[in-house]
Image: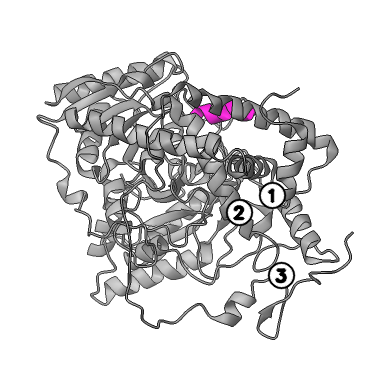
Amino acid sequence: MSGAGATAIEIAAGVRSGERSAREVLEQHLAAIEEREAEIHAFNLVLADEARARADEVDAAVAAGDDPGPLAGVPVALKDNLCTRGIPTTCSSRILEGWQPPYDATVVSALADSGAVFVGKTNLDEFAMGSSTENSAFGPTRNPLDTDRVPGGSSGGSAAAVAAGFSALSIGSDTGGSIRQPAAYCGLVGVKPTYGLVSRYGLIAFGSSLDQIGPFAHTVADAALTLDVISGHDPRDSTSVPAAPASISEALGAGVDGMRVGIVTELMGDAMDANCLDAVRSAAQALEAAGATVGEASIPAALYGLGAYYLIAPAEASSNLARYDGVRYGMRVDAANTGDMNEATRTGGFGDEVKRRIMLGTYALSAGYYDAYYGSAQKVRTLLIREFDAAYADYDILLSPTTPTTAFKFGAKADPVSMYLCDLATIPTNLTGHAAMSVPFGADADNMPIGVQLLAPALGEVPMFQAAEALEAAALSAGGAA
Amino acid sequence: MSDRISRADVSHVARLARLDIEESELDRFTEQLDAILEHAAALDALDLDGVPPMSHPLPLTNVFRVDEVVPSLDRDEVLSQAPAAEDGQFRVPPVLGESQ
């Protein structure tokens, strides 16, 4: 592959060796943006001038004999809930419109230090609350593979940017499936790393015990490289893992011989479309053919994750979003006194889905309901961890569909609960803090990609990526959608 | 209309969350929140007796750091992003002003 369409690893190798320039790579991606962005709307902001200046810096470094880093000249798109100093960061919400953060998120600094070139800030469901990117205050993003369909969400803009060739990589955040589901809908690799593996400093908080940052990429190796670049301890995030994580890139290529793979029985039921279930069975066969052993794993509480999530995530959101009060940043709706100003600002600044979750969370935390709702939901998390721990005693990784269906059409999930059900299979991993990723494996009758989810215990990224690599190879040799 | 959460409950939590929900929107929000809580009620089927609540995914406790002085965010840069600022401080309308 060359130009727009080349992998991040190919681009970085070419730029580091001087074989191609970062500027030339960038111009190819900007041309793709020029051609299709008006239709796709992957971005809230395209940073063409900044990216050109940055690409020229990378080229100058190479010319001077310096190594710009493992992502030298790689165009990267950032979800617009990641703080970028001096560059507007909106969370696709009116309430933050025009705000320019006074600091960079740790992942943004890590990517910049590795030679990445930022092409833009991508669209999302407002404050990352949604599964289709239809909830953005700035209009929806379209799926580049079929513009009548949603790209998934909430990181829909990040998924669309990579799928449309606007960037070679992108970064999203995953609170209940917001990386894996859009990756599945757009035919990409998408990773929700172990909670704490990637610093959340500078990620605008939604559900703090659930949020994790991760990459979108065309290939498993690109996703591994990106995760290697952004992971590690950060003194500014007290929940980040203390020890330096093992390199995932270096562990690739080891194969899956002897790996124990379990299919999660409870996630293989009626809630899932037949083609998504078939993809999981085919994936299991492919891993078996590559030397793994395959069995069935039971997580009896798996389907209860959704109910627990829709108490915990809104509860945490209601607390995190209390800070948008028209005092320190973003918009203000003026009023005669501060209390009225707070209320007018929040009422005018937040969209309906955000208001719904704030009210739900406030209710779940309120006196008289706390034990019944929030308390029970936190117990379900413990139960899920116990059940997954038991499964991981028998299996190295687990498999399930990423999503119940492939990408749906705009407006198809107008009722909130039907939208929430998109995340049935992805949510349990956020509740446990474990690792999971989606890999494209096959397509439906309309040629829309299907995602297979690989799940691993906390810090189990290495075997998870090794299995993902085996699936990618099998999908390629079968002429699949990978 | 609703079993799990009433119109008055929604009105109350909206006020707690500093959201002004119009009368005409209350029914719709009540119905939607009720449907979500209905889903959450499925948890009642689980036996959670004796299961401790989890508050964090990883067992990290007592995360300490060295107490050293490092530069903080630039005050002027931060205040430049506020809706209103004066004399190095955020400016707000009167706290005890007249209500609308």
Percent coordinates x, y for residue A418 in the rendering = 58, 25
Percent coordinates x, y for residue B39 in the rendering = 56, 25
Q: Nearer the viewer, mark 2 or mark 3?
A: 2
Inspect the image, locate mark 2, and give the three-letter code of the amino acid beneath it: Leu
Q: Say which residue appears at 42% left-offset and 50% top-offset.
A: A170
Q: Say which residue appears at 69% left-offset and 61% top-offset.
A: A325
Same subunit, tags 3 and 1: no
Write down the region rendered in magenta: A414-423
Chain containing mark 1: A
Question: What is the spatial separation of the Cα atoms under label 3 and label 1, in whole angstroms?
Answer: 17 Å
Residue A426 vertical position relative to residue A127 in the rendered view, above or below? above
Q: Which residue is mark 2?
A: A321
Q: Which residue is mark 1?
A: A350
Chain containing mark 2: A
Which quadrant is the N terminus of chain A positioned in?
A: top left
Mark 3 crowdedness (10 Å alpha carbons): few <14, some 14-19, many ≥20: some
Residue B50 vertical position relative to residue A267 in the rendered view, above or below? below
Whether tag 1 and tag 2 are in contact, CB under 8 A, the answer is yes
